[in-house]
Image (cartoon, rainbow, N blue to C red):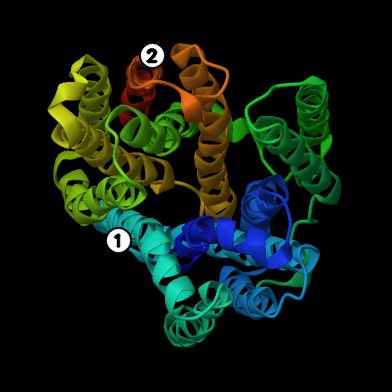
Amino acid sequence: MLLSSLGTSIANVALPTLAKAFNVSFQDVQWVVLAYLLAITTLIVSVGKLGDTFGRRRLLLTGIVLFTVASILCGAAPSLAWLIAARALQGLGAAIMMALTMAMVGEAVPKDKTGSAMGLLGTMSAIGTALGPTLGGLLIAALHWQAIFLVNVPLGIVTFVLAYRSLPQDRQSAKGDRPRFDSLGTLLLALTLAAYALAMTLGRGHFGQLNIALLLAAVIGGGLFLLVETRAASPLVRLSMFRSPVLSAGFVMSALVTTVVMATLVVGPFYLSGALGLDAARVGLVMSSGPIVAALTGAPAGRFVDRFGAYRMGTFGLLAMALGAIVLPLLPTSLGIPGYIVPLSVITAGYALFQAANNTAVMTDIRADQRGVISGLLSLSRNLGLITGASAMGAVFAFGSAVSDITTAHAEAVASGMRLTFTVAAALILLALAVSLASRARTKPLLSSKETP
């Protein structure tokens, strides 16, 4: 979990250096980040299903090897095209690690300790996210851009050794007992997710004809995928699982909440530099406070979930996020850095608590042969939220600022954009809270019917 999160965040800081090294535009070099995210988004559900079908340990070890080898290829890249292709391969390895790590932890840990385990995974993810920019900057300054990829090689080797020695062997099943892999459904889902992700990321905030065409393709692909899954003998995703209010609500809430989290990452740098007048170094320090809070609160949040229950702690986390998102746009810019960090810390701590609770609720009491695909769907919902947040919340920020070029906007315009963005963010959190309450209302009759003799 730490490796895959580190791979996401460490490359961002190197984009200006890579643009100079390969003598390309910033739009071209952005594909170093996009290729990684696209590979994860399009393949994470499929690799989860592969793990359920053919063995999670075997596939997870393969994913670690892929990630490590791809890191070597990234460091040896003689051209941007080579680097982008290697990053896509690295993203495939990361998708395997993300999906199957949570599935294997959910299977190995006793039910009453699931919250603590999920909280610890959240802490590792936050540490990887927080460590990436700092470690990447130090490696580029001390060595060269290649070092940000090659640093994964010793880490990958250590991870492989630990996983090989510690993970339980896959249960052997007769070949005739294995369900057929849904190749058509896998292809349709990958193309649909790729179309949606590209629609949300291409154009640098300008939603043009290509974006609309890709979004339409995603809608059509989604319809075809649902049609294929209803007729497949062994579907990639069993649509009947979405009848569970816990699962369906968990996926929806995860997407909504991570959309808000992405708003803090997209809007934060512009607000801190444009409205508060901070230089790049201080912007980086302030921005690191969010992942640091998440890293510190992840493990305790998991223990709270085990003690007080996933639903109660998930609701408390959403309320904390809503409070932070409501207070942030109300505070005057004259409060400076504390006026931003305090609400941001409340949002981030609330997110850590919600994530531990939601992951625990989704991954508890599910069939053993569905853990991989459900873990993949949970990770997919987060990725879709991040991708949507980067585009949609960025557009809300630009609209609220009422300027054509946000980089040259006055301080008051930037502050206005921030206020509108977090007003929308608060509304999304309240919507997630409503989904949680509706799910609880639907779950109670099911629990009562199960208890009836």
Mark 2 vs mark 1, CA separation in Å: 44 Å
The residue indicated by pointer 1 is 110
Please tell me how crowded label 2 is: few (under 14), some (14-19), or many (20+) other residues with Cα within 10 Å: some
Q: Position of residue 4 (x, y in %)?
A: 50, 63
Task: Determine whether 233 is above or below 110 in the image.
Answer: above
Camera-side residue of 255 and 348: 348
Q: Position of residue 66 (x, y in %)?
A: 66, 75
The residue indicated by pointer 2 is 420
Task: Determine whether 11 is above or below 385 in the image.
Answer: below
Amino acid type assigned to the residue bearing label 1 in the image: Pro
Amino acid type assigned to the residue bearing label 2 in the image: Leu
Q: Position of residue 442 (x, y in %)?
A: 39, 18
Please tell me how crowded label 1 is: few (under 14), some (14-19), or many (20+) other residues with Cα within 10 Å: few
Q: Residue at x 21, y 44 (%)?
A: 305
The residue mark sitting in front, 2 or 1, is 2
Camera-side residue of 307 and 334: 334
N-terminal of the pair, mark 2 or mark 1, is 1
Taking 54 as reference, is 399 left or right?
Answer: left
Taking 220 as reference, is 323 left or right?
Answer: left
Give the quarter of the figure containing the N terminus: bottom left
Q: Residue at x 36, y 64 (%)?
A: 134
Q: Position of residue 315 (x, y in %)?
A: 25, 27
Q: Do the CB atoms of the residues marked 2 and 1 lie less than 8 Å apart? A: no
Camera-side residue of 301 and 134: 134
